[in-house]
Image: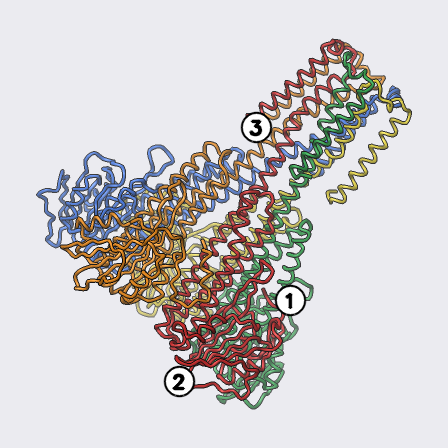
Chain colours: A green, B yellow, C blue, D orange, E red
Amino acid sequence: MIKNRRSQKAGLPPGTLIYIGDKKVEKPRISLIEFDEFHVNEKELTDLTDWKPVSDGKTVTWLDIGGLHETKLIAQVGQYFNLHPLLLEDIVNTDQRPKADDYSDYLYIVLKMLYPADNADQVISEQVSIVLGRDYVLTFQENGKDVFDSLKSRLRAGKGQIRKRGTDYLCYALIDGIVDHYFIILERLGERIGALEDRCVLDPTNVSLGKILQLKKDTLYLRRAVWPLREVVNGLQRDDNALIKESTKPYLRDVYDHTVQIMETIETFHDQITGMLEIYLSSNSQRMAAVMKVLTIITTIFMPLTFIAGIYGMNFEHMPELKSPWGYPAVLAAMASIVIAMVVFFRKKKWL
Amino acid sequence: MIKNRRSQKAGLPPGTLIYIGDKKVEKPRISLIEFDEFHVNEKELTDLTDWKPVSDGKTVTWLDIGGLHETKLIAQVGQYFNLHPLLLEDIVNTDQRPKADDYSDYLYIVLKMLYPADNADQVISEQVSIVLGRDYVLTFQENGKDVFDSLKSRLRAGKGQIRKRGTDYLCYALIDGIVDHYFIILERLGERIGALEDRCVLDPTNVSLGKILQLKKDTLYLRRAVWPLREVVNGLQRDDNALIKESTKPYLRDVYDHTVQIMETIETFHDQITGMLEIYLSSNSQRMAAVMKVLTIITTIFMPLTFIAGIYGMNFEHMPELKSPWGYPAVLAAMASIVIAMVVFFRKKKWL
Amino acid sequence: MIKNRRSQKAGLPPGTLIYIGDKKVEKPRISLIEFDEFHVNEKELTDLTDWKPVSDGKTVTWLDIGGLHETKLIAQVGQYFNLHPLLLEDIVNTDQRPKADDYSDYLYIVLKMLYPADNADQVISEQVSIVLGRDYVLTFQENGKDVFDSLKSRLRAGKGQIRKRGTDYLCYALIDGIVDHYFIILERLGERIGALEDRCVLDPTNVSLGKILQLKKDTLYLRRAVWPLREVVNGLQRDDNALIKESTKPYLRDVYDHTVQIMETIETFHDQITGMLEIYLSSNSQRMAAVMKVLTIITTIFMPLTFIAGIYGMNFEHMPELKSPWGYPAVLAAMASIVIAMVVFFRKKKWL
Amino acid sequence: MIKNRRSQKAGLPPGTLIYIGDKKVEKPRISLIEFDEFHVNEKELTDLTDWKPVSDGKTVTWLDIGGLHETKLIAQVGQYFNLHPLLLEDIVNTDQRPKADDYSDYLYIVLKMLYPADNADQVISEQVSIVLGRDYVLTFQENGKDVFDSLKSRLRAGKGQIRKRGTDYLCYALIDGIVDHYFIILERLGERIGALEDRCVLDPTNVSLGKILQLKKDTLYLRRAVWPLREVVNGLQRDDNALIKESTKPYLRDVYDHTVQIMETIETFHDQITGMLEIYLSSNSQRMAAVMKVLTIITTIFMPLTFIAGIYGMNFEHMPELKSPWGYPAVLAAMASIVIAMVVFFRKKKWL
Amino acid sequence: MIKNRRSQKAGLPPGTLIYIGDKKVEKPRISLIEFDEFHVNEKELTDLTDWKPVSDGKTVTWLDIGGLHETKLIAQVGQYFNLHPLLLEDIVNTDQRPKADDYSDYLYIVLKMLYPADNADQVISEQVSIVLGRDYVLTFQENGKDVFDSLKSRLRAGKGQIRKRGTDYLCYALIDGIVDHYFIILERLGERIGALEDRCVLDPTNVSLGKILQLKKDTLYLRRAVWPLREVVNGLQRDDNALIKESTKPYLRDVYDHTVQIMETIETFHDQITGMLEIYLSSNSQRMAAVMKVLTIITTIFMPLTFIAGIYGMNFEHMPELKSPWGYPAVLAAMASIVIAMVVFFRKKKWL
């Protein structure tokens, strides 16, 4: 969705930092983790004044910032790590598409974090920026919630290879964590689609077009979100890049496989929804046909009867039947046999 | 849309300058800016006789011409800067697609400037030609309004990097300024679509097909305008070119990201409109079904009643019911109970 | 469209010259132009016996043949210029797709000339073959009309660069002349579409499906004709080829831009026609709905009235209302109020 | 169409020769032609025992086998010419897609021969395998009919270049002969489509959906058959291959042009059929609308009349009109004027 | 279909072995075959403790494991053959897409084995992982059933080339065995489609939309399963790879041809189903039209009759017809002639 506020930037020089988005947290959270294979050092900072990144060639610095509305802070980080002004602009412009830009000294990756809203069916999308340097990783999130908690505790515990393998593996782990969350969204969407599909089979008259179209919209939205993500991960896994070691590539290929799997699930969803639409439209036209049949049956049965009654309601003086004592019962009997003939006819036509 | 006047060129030799388009300004405006890092010199000229471009290797000359119907002036500029006759022809043929032609000594870029018409929903498209040389930039617009005003004041003020970075950065800034205007068009279109979508949900009977199709047309028009623009910017950003420095590439990549974002927004619009069409068609057929139901209910209730009235309107002499004092009330009671049975039946069928 | 006569060639060895097409001219016209920068020599020949092409390295020979049914003449030209038998076969098989075949010593280009038929809406397609050699250009047309007249007079006048630039520029000028004619066809089609579109908006009931589908067919036909043309011109402009000088490439690129523009206009036409189809189908179903509404209103108003009349047409002896002097006016009043209630109801439902 | 018998091969080792298809000829026909520029030697063999291929570097051996159910014979040929077991398997598996496999020493080409069945509209597809070696060409057909007769007589007569140009030209001539037959199928299909299209315009009510869909199916079938054929010929014409001389390439390019032309005709057929479907559906819904109109007109005219008759059928004692001598004619006149008003109304609405 | 359990892996480090899927066998089956050209040694193991792979450069070890829920066993195999942790994770994550990952020392291939469920129409999909090393092949299946039985007996018998050609040929034979099973699924699906198609032609009113859509779903499911399979086999056949010998490539190309054939058959199925849908929808709307016609005919016949009866039911005192002795028979005759006129009219309109 386009943000209204982007147009306010028309005419400004490039690199101007203006935060586009809602302020989601009162004060930005700055958490710092410095680690090498044997040590972990974790701190929450209030500002970056007086701070200096370690650069002993071994220590990996991970600076994780939550909350992007204090553009001065972003500018400060940019100065410390000598980042390109356009990169800083992209961090605060939270309507970016997922992409990976290679600035030779560092790699800039923008992703979308998706998580379910508190109230049922909606999905909240948040921009996560990752800057991968030779001995540092910077992450920028829109709010203060920490989506990387499980990763941080793995770092603290020193489990797995996370502490031994340098910045590119950390970057992979961050991306992997984000992509894993997509499966949760996918499962929720899948459940909603499955539930509606069941209703479509059991009681199609009660399914509303609006709900089907809403699901379609959500699926298209997800597809549009995952498509560039797939491209980004594919690029990281395939292209040569001084910052990403050959030994990390299989892990990125694994993430890539996940994104392909997600795309495929979305395609399946799309087919399911298309099928539902066809059932919906068809059941609608069948209900219409049922109404028509009732109308036709009623008309077909009563029109001849009413006509016969009309005949004997005529006031001709010379109508011998009227005088006969058997006239009335005979007419009633004739009417009854017409009704029976009709019903038999409709049975044969399978309208009843 | 194809201009009728293009066919008048059939049979003429290439390079013949004939202005295709409406004369939008009485007299062409010629504004000249010469600048280097420390000086800016700005002039409005009335003609180019006696003028000579500075070429001291440092000064950047930007010649901005508004109004293309005086083809002699265009030819004069062509002579001064030694431009290819086909290029000059393209400048005055204002039905070009956006494109970038590389003439080794200079680069010729055609873009479309879009801005909203004064009366609400329409979009005006105007051709902007940019010639990027080693120490000059030429711009040609159809009318006298200056779409580059904010850029010129940035040049005067010397803010940002605009004065330090040479012709390619100026060219980038021009393109960026044009692309930024697309967001304004996009937002307006988005608002119109959103408004119609709301109406589709609240009161679908009042939405007209014509309006939906108009929006679809506008969206397709925009897509067709942005698609080649994207290609042009992608080519500038990716291809090697002696006139565009490596350090300017990230800025062009940034513009490219914007065009991709615009394309995506347009795709979303397209999906929204498709959804509206489906709702429109479905609500139409539902209204039809509602009409059918009313018809059927009326027929089903009154046909048997009228038939019964017809029965007792017959003139048989031997109809004992007619003599009974309870005959009339009994028939009325029977009719009432038929009506009640019908209503219960329809309630069960969910037609009422 | 497939020609029936192609099947008669099954089983014949390749290179057999059989003219496929209608004989459009009594006797082939052979016109010869020999020129260099300073001289032009123009002749109409009756046959090619005793004729010999000049080959002094400077003179350009342009042999333009109209009428292909005398295959002996084609074979003779083939001998003079040492052309491949398959090429000669392609010249007389007038159901070729546009293509460019490179026979190293010469280039063979097939194009389709389109021009409007005398009676309004039809398009006549004719095959034009161009053979581009180092110092000669051969053109073969199906009929005797000369589509290259304006080019010949430019040659005679020596205007522009046409006499200075050799065979490849002449070849470009020929292609350009043909492509320019497409714009005329396009404008005619555009006018027809525009006229029908206007009618669709003003009076959709009077638009016939047949006309819309005819326009769609014409548009598809044109698209199919232009698509390979675009490929041919693109190939000429992009590929390396000893026969086409670098300085002629920008001109071919210009023709290529024209073909792209034509393709785009056709796409726009296609969208317009799709929109018309949607309006047509929708207006059809709306007319149906209007008929339904009339039916339902009539039924709904008169059924209860007829029923009431039926009630008081019953012959019961004990119906006190019948004796009352106010019975008749009271019933009429009741009927009137039912009608009024109905009308109010339908007004509210927006059916009236 | 999938053959049932392929599943019987699951689990067998590759290279097992099992003929999949109908036995179309009692005994395989083996015809042998050995030729060089000056001699032709033609024989019908009964088996291959005691036979040895000539290999003097000049003679071309063409072995043409009709009937594939004697797998022993196929295996024998395989031994003589040292063919790969998979190739032999492909020869007898007659559900292959057209393809060209390069086994360096020889080239294996599978094509589909299409010819019309005796009874009108059907097409019979038969597999033709061609093995192109340095000095031999092997062809395998399913039945005994000889589709290469005209080629053989050209060989005997020594007309054209067929005897001078070696195995690759012979192979080209075989492919060309097969592709030429496609035009016959195409023309038949085109005639059927044209005939149905005429009927669609003249009398759409009599066109059956089944026939249109059958044509669509046939067109899709043909498209699916031609598509891989095109790829095969394109590969032969474009790729480097020691067995195909440069001088034969233009001939293959010519065949390729034919396949492209066939594809295009098929696309046109497809469009025509789509148009017919649209006309069919639209004429259906228009017939429905016509029925509705009749219904509505009848109802609208007679309901008010019947109501009026009902009024004066009421048995009120105080209805002054009933006593008037002009009552009856006045009512009849009123009814007549209602009918006239209705008809005028419907005329205006264009329903009559 | 997305598995619910994948989301439980979010946040875990990569390489964590968690089996996703149903436990299909009580205890994993471990079968070991060691063979060279002259010997075969076949064993069923209960666990892998104390076992060591032979590595004499000649013997090929094939370890076939059925049942993946004992992740310890998988980890053990991983240790023996030094496999990448991500590979092991992929083995137990049974929702992989078919793919081939090249880990330079070995090749990891994931495929889907499809076989029909016991109850008629369903298809069971099971993941088969193949690890191809220089002198070993590992296969991992989900259940204990052995889909490779026929291959094993070929190994035992030493028939064909299977024992002479090393690990890559064994790997080919495994893939070939799996792909051959697809034809069985395809034939079943083809039979179901054919049966429904016959019913569509003979008695379209009895075909249910649900069945058609189910077939469409199954076809789409199959397409989605085969598509990546095709890519995998194409990659193996085309790419250079130290583990796959040049002489095995033709065999893989043969498998590739099979996958292409399968894809094509699926496309044909898809077209057939689309055709059925069109017939279904059209026959539905034709039934609707038939109902309408009955309604219209009844109304058109009886309305005028009832009206006439109503006329003569009016109570005017001065209606001379009522007194005439021929009045009644004349009216009846008039009614009869109206009916006859109607029937003739409808016959002409082809409604009867």
What is the spatial separation of the Cα atoms under label 2 and label 1, in whole angstroms? Answer: 55 Å
Q: Nearer the viewer, mark 2 or mark 3?
A: 2
> Is label 2 in a helix, a strand or a loop?
loop
What x and y, as percent, mark residue D79?
29, 66
Share a chain, discs 2 and 1?
no
Residue C314 pos. (x, y %): 82, 23
* Neighbourhood count class around disc 1 (C-alpha, 10 Å): few under 14, some 14–19, many 20 upward: some
- Which chain does the residue under circle 3 lie in? D
- The residue singled out by tag 1 in the image is A116
Q: Residue A25 is drawn in which quadrant? A: bottom right
Protein chain holding label 1: A
Q: Which residue is mark 2?
A: E57
- Indicate the quadrant containing the N terminus of chain C: top left, top right, bottom left or bottom right: top left
Q: Is residue A334 left or right of residue D221?
A: right
**Which element carries disc 1, helix, strand or loop?**
strand
* Residue behind mark 3: D350
